[in-house]
Image (cartoon, grey):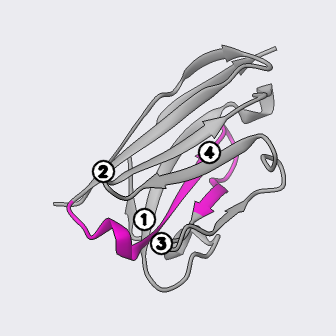
Amino acid sequence: QVQLVESGGGSVQAGGSLRLSCQASGFTYSKFCMGWFRQAPGKEREVVALVDSDGSTRYANSVKDRFTISRDSANNILYLQMNTLQPDDTAMYYCAAKRNPGCPSSLSAYEYWGQGTQVTVSS
């Protein structure tokens, strides 16, 4: 049974940091592209950061140089280190997995999704 379980969300003030984690199970983690996505109230879900099985990464322009995505292949964990958080980063954050090949930004390409973890940034 495939599971993606996010954790690490919370409430912080602007300028603060959080690290999100996503524990994956039930599939061959090393053969999947992994991504973080977010959805703010009243907005569409959007890509935040992607990491392919070879470790290559891509970021949304809005988070570049502030967020870092990484994957721990030994323990099947996906991370998102978020620094210099801003109120516009407030959203529900989801991790998702897509079987190789390819690591697109299109949400519809991702087969498995977690339930999400809430991040709230106050000014």
Place of residue 88 in the rendered image (x, y in percent of width and height, measured from the top left): 79, 33
Distance Cα–Cα, label 3 vs label 4 = 24 Å
Which residue, given by chain and number where applicable, does mark 2 sit on?
Answer: 75
Place of residue 122 in the rendered image (x, y in percent of width and height, measured from the top left): 74, 15
> Residue at (67%, 24%) from the top-left corner?
17
Instruction: Specify the amino acid type for callout 4.
Output: Gln
Dot 1 or dot 2, earlier in sequence = 2
Distance Cα–Cα, label 4 vs label 1 = 17 Å
Residue in front for this viewpoint, 51 or 97: 51
Q: Quadrant of residue 67?
A: top right
Q: Is residue 75 visible?
A: yes
Residue in front for this viewpoint, 83 or 6: 83
Dot 4 or dot 2, earlier in sequence = 4
Residue 45 colored in magenta in the image: yes
Q: Rate crowding at label 3 as few (under 14), some (14 to 19) or many (20 or more) other CA atoms within 10 Å.
A: many
Instruction: Specify the amino acid type for callout 2.
Output: Asn
